[in-house]
Amino acid sequence: MKVNELKHAGLKKWVEDNVALMTPDSVEICDGSKGEYDRMLKILVSAGLATPLKKRPNSYLFRSDPSDVARAESRTFISSKNKDDAGPTNNWRDPVELKQTMSGLYKGCMKGRTMYVIPFSMGPVGSDIAKIGVEITDSPYVVINMHIMTRVGKKVLDVLGKDGFFVPCLHSIAKPLNPGESDNGKWPCEPDVEKKYISHFPDTYEIWSYGSGYGGNALLGKKCLALRIASALARDEGWLAEHMLILKITNPKKEVKYLAGALPSACGKTNLAMLVPTLKGWKVETIGDDIAWMKFGKDGRLYAINPEAGFFGVAPGTSEQSNYNAMQSIKKNSIFTNCGLTEDGDIWWEQIGYGAPGKTIIDWKGNEKPAPKTDKAVKGEEIAHANARFTAPANQCPVIAKEWQDPKGVPISAFLFGGRRATTIPLVNQSKSWVHGVFMGSITGSEITAAALDLKEGSVRRDPFAMLPFCGYHMGDYFNHWLKLGKKAEDEGKGDKLPKIFFVNWFRKDKDGHFMWPGYGENSRVLAWMFDRCDNKDNFVETAIGKLPKTGAIEAPPGVSAEIMSELCSVDTEGWKNEISDVRDKHYAKFGDRLPKVLYDELDAIEKRLNS
Ligand code: O2Y
Ligand code: MN
């Protein structure tokens, strides 16, 4: 298809304007076909950027530039008209000035390259909950990743029609080529981090990205559209765009429930999404591992879709033990970025579960090193980058639920929040009400372990709703959005249809620093308790901080004593008093008068109960 054949006048003009600005050598409208995917890979292999993997059919390894290995948070901007609307947790830039600066950078930025126009759907094509985006990019690496992570092609343009809504997503790697020049094995990007921009314009629902070819900075459907821009759309349209996995749980009686869960980075969200239960008769299946979009149905229930079509998972730490189903998902048709390359043509990373075969290995920077005999990480000598990634189609996951692409979505019975907390926070806690649940989401966070960070070791880095890097507007207003949705449901007499809200903590430690709970598949015991709670089973005790498991309601996993279970499931009154002060003085205080008053009331009520 040619640009002048585009039926949507707004899309056609947007593409033409950017062709004039960026001056690519040619333009391609992507059709999402296998032929297109294969052609992109041929281009990438011949440019020396992709290495085919002998051990994994149709799979390739990429090595990015050391400046371009993760989301660039300091270069991620929320550019709303009013600075106050971005809030204290986002980097704000004036939209007029930012667009002027970036338009200057975009001028001629695609010289010597092809401009790819990628029409994509976040969510099953045509679903009422899905949204359409169109990404303009000069990176064939982005094209193949978007093929896996989203639904690409003509079917999307058909749904868009002549005047449908789409989110325009502009992207350039910022590396024009001179005549006859090729990338020649060097990952193209702007190596100066200060010249990278990942900009969001929530008032006009636009994304402009420049200088990075990596992950969330460049695959604009994921964090940029599906979270930052979608959170603003959800605020404006009355739905939820959340950084949440979606699970299907089946109990031994074959009853099914769906759960959505938010955990900050490095808390095992993908592992939980693909968990292999140890509890007999229970089954866990995956709907999504990272993002959930949810709308209320006419029946008052909240329906969720996974807007993505693939997994963009962290490789190091992924093994058959930590995530069997992820390891099966990446056996073929997968893209690997910044992993090690073994002598026999396979990928390798730290904590993959085995040492590297052969004598030597190529690390993520392309250097030959002795092949590690164990999979332990050696600080400073890592073979894979800590943020090395796999991109794999979701339908390759052995436990993908049959309804994962249902355009109606799945009805959510429970929300789960959690973080890495060595102390204070119990194994699981159910909120007393919707408002209390929003309070729980708002105080989500993990303890700091790396002393190098700007917080005192052991203090809590709050990541409300695990949305801190992903909320496209003021977090105080975001809390209010959650409160408003709950109040509306209650005012309409549908409060009982709202998902129940839980807070989990798999990471409690004893005084010797050992984990008290084994985690992984044993977390199914906690999921089972939550499942039963959704059916109002009498398996809880009411406490000052919420509903906790009754003694014996969660059967202890092997090796966990009754005393430990009791400690995991009881209220640490002194710890909670400190928690309340920390939230009031260091966390909520940041949000000024946009912090909803009812959350302060909730804080006061818990404190009063703890003191009584
Ligand atoms: O490193 C990146 O660019 C992506 S970060 C990411 C990728 C997949 C799922 N979640 C995340 C995250 O940071 O939450
Ligand atoms: Mn994520």
Image (cartoon, rainbow, N blue to C red):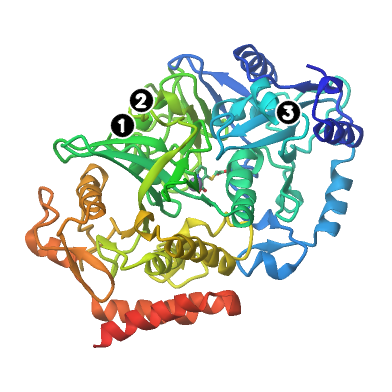
The residue tagged 3 is 161
Front in this rendered view, residue 219 or 460:
219
Where's residue 77, x and y in %?
A: 70, 56
Mark 3 to mark 2: distance in Å? 38 Å
Q: In which quarter of the image is residue 222?
A: top right
Q: Residues within 10 Å of mark 2 (few under 14, many from 20)?
A: some
Of circles 3 and 2, which is in front?
Answer: 3
The residue tagged 1 is 324
Instruction: State the SS at label 3.
Output: loop
Q: In which quarter of the image is residue 492?
A: bottom left
Where's residue 196, x and y in %?
A: 73, 48
16 left or right, relative to 447: right
Mark 3 to mark 1: distance in Å? 42 Å
Instruction: Tell me which label, 3 or 1, sits earlier in the chain.
Output: 3
Q: Which amino acid does label 1 sit on?
A: Tyr
Question: Mark 3 and 2 residues: CB-CB less than 8 Å, in contact?
Answer: no
Q: Can residue 141 be seen in this view?
A: yes
Mark 1 to mark 2: distance in Å? 6 Å
Q: What residue type is labelled 3?
A: Gly
